[in-house]
Image (cartoon, rainbow, N blue to C red):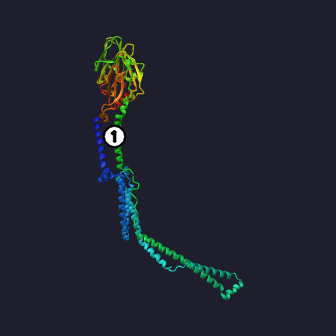
Amino acid sequence: MRAVLAWLGRTGFLYLLLFAGIAFFVFAWPAVRGGLSGESLRQDAMSVEAVREQLAEDRQAAQAGLEARVAEAGTLGSKSLAERRGALVQERAAIDGELAEGGGWLDSIRPSRILARKRLQLRRAAVEAELAAIDLAREKDARQVAVARATAELQEYRRIPTERAIAISRRLCRDATAELEAFDEREALDRAARQIFLLQRARLESERRRTCDLAESRATTRDRGLAARDAVFEARARLAEAQDIVASPLPDPAAGVSDTTLRDIALRALLALLAVLLIPFAIRVLFYYVFAPIVARGAPIRLALPSGLGIVPQAEGGSRPTLSVTLAEGEELLVRQSYLQSSPAGADMRTQWLLSWGSILTSLASGMAFLTRARGAGGTYGISARDDPFAEIARIDLPRGSALVMQPRALAAIVQPEGQPMPIRSRWRLFSLHAWLTFQLRYLVFHGPGALIVKGGRGVRIEPATGGRRFGQDQLVGFSAHTAYTVTRSETFLPYFFGREPLFRDRVADVDADSFRAEPGILVIEEAPMAGRRKGVRAGLEGAFDAALKAFGI
């Protein structure tokens, strides 16, 4: 069933890949291929200045072509103009359709897409200008007819009365009106006699009507004549506009072009990449030749005075996969349960919950809890790592008066006098730059008498610290308390420069910065710190936890 489901899954996944590939080549590839032409790629490498120069050249060429077509439009007939106008309307609609399609999210910075869109806008402006010129040319005939009609109307008003003649006529009209009114004010008998015998009122009425009509006629004739003259001037002006058809200037297509193109972004990305690649190397040079020498001249960490420790720890035989421990009279063994390989029958063995009740958290965090305590003179016990095939064991004897700085995580067992727990003292170094650089602010000092049985990946190496010894930070297991502990710059520059070695290595020496000669000390280091450790996510979490414990000397 599992094989069938696996086959169905593989086949279905292959089908989806084929479906996606065919769909891409059918629907997306034509558009993508158009954008990957040689000309498009060349344009995409243009700078902003080059894009603007190209648009300026396109505008100049479009303006010259527009002026030539406008000049030609002035010579075409009505039919040709109508056909040309129809073609331009269709072209304008096609351009509007392309502009309305929009573009991709990179079109605002791709020079090829910027040029294509700006050229469309430039072409549309040219079409609009040519349409305006054609419409003006088509009005030419109509304007000529308007000029002829206005001229014919003006012929009817060859002589236009002056304002003085109109004023005289209106004065005569007023005089005639006054005489008629004066006649009407006479006595009724006198008016009747004059009207009967002389027909005076009829004459006065006729004279008033004649003079007033003349004044009104002259005023009307003047108004119409002036209007006809203005109509002629206006018609001739409009005809002059049609006679002199010029192309309007096209807008500048470079306006609104983004100040950043794909080339600028690529250059900035290249500079950022170079900065990302080169700045770490520059920082490494600065750290190696400036920062590291300053740090190395700082005061070393010394956890015990040399004058108070006349005896130093002793180690013989080196490390081995299995170590036999024989208890002397009055001694007891505290061993991790996973490291007790064999024990004598009838031995006095019990459980001890913690290595030290004065350091509960340290005992728990370092794994020195739930220990096996064994007593009995002459009993021999086999100490070996049952769960770690790469671990080896070494014994370090601490005579009375000696002291060893030790990380409890490296302890496999302790041999101490019965009823006299080995003294473990805590030393903090919060104000030491060396402590912060090694990320170990607290140190645990084990004082004799007794013996420490330590473990390490692929073995534990115990070396004399005379003259100073350098080693990797993760290799450190312990060192004599009276020695000077510092960080020092890596010996060679190029391995550090190329990231093969760290900037600092730890150093333990019997000679401090004041060249004070102390008793010989020892250094305890782990041969292969990473041997036997887990890998992957779990190893990363455990490594982070171990780094945090290291700060507290665990």
Q: What element carries label 1?
A: helix
x and y, in percent, of residue 440 in the image: 39, 27
Give the residue displayed 33% in from the left and 52% down from the top. Answer: 46
Pick the quarter of the image with the N terminus.
top left
Question: From what the image shows, is residue 196 above or below residue 117?
Answer: below
Residue 131 seen in render: yes
Q: Name the residue under label 1.
A: 278
In terms of depth relative to the viewer, which is nearer, 272 or 313? 313
Residue 144 is left or right of residue 466, and the answer is right
**Residue 241 placement: quadrant:** bottom left
Question: From what the image shows, is residue 438 above or below residue 57?
Answer: above
Residue 1 seen in render: no
x and y, in percent, of residue 342 in the image: 30, 16
Question: From what the image shows, is residue 145 above or below residue 338?
Answer: below
Q: Residues within 10 Å of mark 1 (few under 14, many from 20)?
A: few
x and y, in percent, of residue 354 in the image: 39, 19
x and y, in percent, of residue 142 in the image: 43, 72
Question: From what the image shows, is residue 223 above or below residue 42?
Answer: below
Q: Which amino acid does label 1 sit on?
A: Leu
In terms of depth relative to the viewer, which is nearer, 94 or 553? 553
Give the residue displayed 63% in from the left and 81% down from the top. Answer: 175
Pick the quarter of the image with the C terminus.
top left
**Residue 192 placement: quadrant:** bottom right
